[in-house]
Image: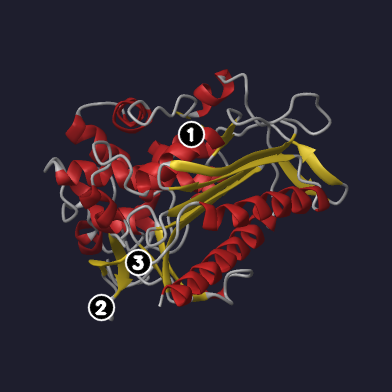
Amino acid sequence: MLLKPILFFSSLSAAIWLPTFETYAKTSDFKALADSFKHDFHRNLKANKVPGGAFVIVEGDSILKLSTYGKRTKGGSKNINSDTVFRLASVSKTFAGTLASMLVEEHKLDWNQSIVSYVPEFDLADKQAAKQINLGHIIGHSTGLWPNSYDNLVNANVKMPKIIPKFEELTPMCSPGVCYGYQNVAFSFIQTAIETQAKQDYSELLQQRIFSPLKMGSASVGYEAFQMTKNRAEPHVKTKSGFKKVKVKPNYYQLAPAAGVNASISDMSKWLMANLGQNPSVIPNSVLKDITTPGIKTSRELRRRDWRAYLDSAHYGKGWRVYEFEGRPLIYHAGWVAGYVAEISYSPELNIGMAMLLNGESRVIAKLSSQYWRDVFKHADKLEQQSF
């Protein structure tokens, strides 16, 4: 048996890496579940009339199963393949958290730095509270701001220079670091800090530090990059008469850290492997530990349909959600933006990860992912029992 680092949850809600004996069998033990998931994925997307999608399941540095379904455009002739690019929506936050943590490790950023030092035009009705919000609060959704502050203005395609001054009208709902409030606008303030310290454009930095070294060949940032991609999945929203193709909206693309990344399912397989520790020269284990350390409690996640039957606790790390799924750690994030849904999740304990991308708004993605992890962890329990 091999020694392997496994993530445990402590009573202090901190991630503790301890050596423990590897009790899990080799890839073949989980491949059957991946094969079964392919059947479930295709059956559920067909039943829900989702135009198209793709998924990948990896173990370590190997792909257990990658499969695609449907068309890039409803009624079109072009099939989705492994290199078809989708919008990742809020799964983009996983890249932002990782990039920021890299710079912290290199002493170019500090989680305790005030965001006002980088975004001086940011203010609140309580000026002292504004100064207390630091980079760690920004990346961990613990700013004390009301959830989704000024997303309504983003939806209306108002630009950031006009949105930021609006914050001076807000009174926080709690002190920084005390309560959870999911943000898109405030989360994206991290871009200014990153660009200031790295002296480089955010999209260029992602390309240089993550996309290129991981060989994520079709990954990009921004509206223009997506529009220039020929092999892309078009967005579809659900109406009373079924899914309807819509135009790609540029509004959330201005929030690059929160929702600006585009990628294929092939790219996501490489992103998963890196987060499973397979590319320490790109993403050091110390960064992986930092971004997946449980931070603020996210109790509302415990009430999520399809997930609530399995979750014992839920926190936000740094660009990643950290779940306890029937006693086992699961690192997770989802994304939803007009016409697209995405999910990514992995078990650091089992060294297995999965990602799904759809070009139609459907809640079936949550059903599929939660049931997949239920089956994987049940299988792991069985293997553990057999090993003793």
> Which residue is found at the position 70% from the left and 51% from the top?
41
Mark 1 / mark 3, whichever is N-terminal = 3
Q: What residue type is labelled 2?
A: Leu
Q: In this view, does 59 lie above or below 143?
A: above
Distance from label 1 to label 3 (Cα)?
38 Å
Pointer 1 residue: 267
Mark 1 or mark 3, which is nearer to you? 1
Measured as percent of width and height from the top left, residue 233 is found at 66, 31
Residue at 13% across, 41% down:
106
- Spatial CA span between label 1 and label 2: 35 Å
Compared to residue 103, the image places residue 212 above or below, namely above
Q: Mark 2 points at which residue?
A: 12
Disc 2 element: loop
Location of the N terminus by quadrant is bottom left
In terms of secondary structure, where does tag 3 sit?
loop
Which residue sits at x=47%, y=57%? 148
Q: Where is residue 251 in the image (x, y as percent from the top left)?
A: 54, 37
| Amino acid at pointer 3 | Pro
Mark 2 surroundings: few (<14), some (14-19) or many (≥20) residues within 10 A: few
* Residue linked to disc 3: 172
Nearer to us in this view, 79 or 246: 79
Mark 1 vs 2, N-terminal side? 2
Q: Disc 2 vs disc 3: Cβ atoms closer than 8 Å?
A: no
From where the camera sits, is residue 117 visible?
yes
In the rendered image, which quarter is residue 273 located in?
top left
Work out whether residue 118 can be spotted: no
Q: Badge 1 local density, few (<14 within 10 Å), some, or many (20+)? A: many
Q: Is residue 42 left or right of residue 369?
A: right
Number of the label disc, if any, that sits on residue 219: none
